[in-house]
């Protein structure tokens, strides 16, 4: 019992230690092979995108997001998706300045062509006959239902799920495009996205990371200062 307790305390200390994240990441990369190496590479694309954000601009966006937090959090719970991810999508789509765009996008999440089955799911959760995209709460429910649909369609792959959300049903949807190019994951799909939003998932996740850090630390940290990079990686990217 004493030996077990000592080992448990030692493991707890190691996990809490600053050196745990790089060591464990390196171990996962060695064990996980190519797939894990690709995941780590994409994660660092997200960290680099967060680093490039203007801190003042992010603070203003966080302030604009506050009135919409209850609706987004409620929609996230209803469809069992990460609320920080939904915040990241809204930040990328509208910067929390709801409007109608020239390409047909509506409101907070720039809702466009939503499949009927998804609209019915959102309506059922809202308890209404037909969701209204101009209503911020309805808009959030439509976005959460749509994101959950595409995430499931992409077998839980977060990067592909976000890309599919952005592409929607146009061009046959992401599944058709992937089959066309023989791509199996986001890393192999990226080079073919010349006319499509190849950086969309990275932008969404960099904003989602900012919201998660704000919740976790109550402030936004400059990635390059001191030990912030290690701490931010310990906090982790939402959904990964």
Image (cartoon, rainbow, N blue to C red):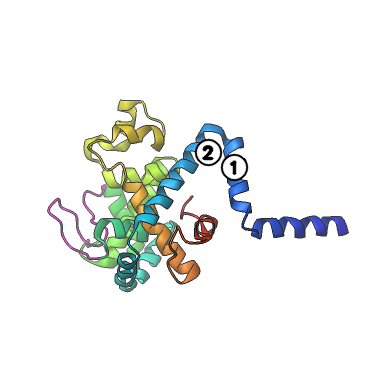
Q: Which residue corresponds to mark 2?
A: 36
The image quadrant that residue 150 belongs to is top left
Q: Marks 1 and 2, how far apart in space?
A: 10 Å
Residue 1 in view here: no
In the image, taking residue 232 as reference, residue 150 lies left or right, namely left
Q: Nearer the viewer, residue 111 or 23?
A: 23
Residue under the point 19% across and 54% down:
105
The residue positioned farthest toward the right in the image shown = 2
Q: Nearer the viewer, residue 110 or 77?
A: 110
Residue under the point 55% across and 57% down:
234
The 10 Å Cα crowd at callout 2, few under 14, some 14 to 19, many 20 or more, is: some
Of marks 1 and 2, the one in the foreground: 1
Contact check, label 1 and label 2, Cβ < 8 Å: no
Look at the image and say whether residue 227 sits in the magenta stretch. Answer: no
Q: Secondary structure at mark 1?
A: helix
Q: Which mark is residue 90?
A: none
Task: Tell me: residue 140, above or below residue 45.
Answer: below
Look at the image and say whether residue 105 sits in the magenta stretch. Answer: yes
Where is residue 119? Give x, y as percent: 28, 53
The image quadrant that residue 207 belongs to is bottom left
The magenta segment: 97-115
Q: Which residue corresponds to mark 1?
A: 26
Please state the total of marks drawn on the protein image: 2
The 10 Å Cα crowd at callout 1, few under 14, some 14 to 19, many 20 or more, is: some
Residue under the point 31% across and 62% down:
140
The image quadrant that residue 124 belongs to is bottom left
Residue under the point 35% across and 55% down:
52
């Amino acid at each position: 019992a004493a030996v077990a307790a000592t080992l448990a305390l030692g493991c707890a200390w190691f996990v809490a230690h600053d050196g745990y994240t790089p060591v464990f990441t390196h171990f996962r990369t060695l064990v996980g092979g190519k797939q894990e190496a690709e995941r780590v590479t994409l994660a660092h694309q997200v960290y680099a995108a967060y680093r490039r954000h203007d801190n003042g601009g992010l603070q203003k966006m966080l302030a604009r997001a506050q009135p919409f937090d209850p609706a987004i959090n409620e929609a996230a719970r209803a469809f069992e998706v990460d609320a920080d991810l939904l915040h990241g999508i809204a930040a990328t789509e509208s910067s929390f300045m709801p409007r109608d765009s020239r390409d047909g996008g509506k409101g907070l999440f720039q809702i466009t062509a939503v499949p009927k089955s998804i609209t019915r799911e959102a309506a059922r959760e809202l308890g209404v006959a037909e969701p209204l995209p101009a209503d911020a709460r309805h808009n959030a429910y439509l976005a959460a239902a749509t994101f959950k649909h595409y995430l499931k369609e992409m077998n839980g792959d977060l990067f592909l799920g976000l890309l599919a959300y952005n592409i929607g049903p146009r061009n046959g949807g992401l599944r058709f495009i992937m089959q066309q190019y023989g791509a199996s994951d986001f890393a192999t799909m990226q080079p073919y996205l010349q006319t499509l939003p190849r950086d969309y998932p990275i932008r969404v996740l960099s904003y989602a990371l900012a919201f998660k850090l704000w919740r976790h630390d109550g402030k936004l940290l400059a990635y390059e200062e001191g030990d912030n990079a290690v701490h931010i990686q310990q906090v982790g990217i939402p959904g990964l």
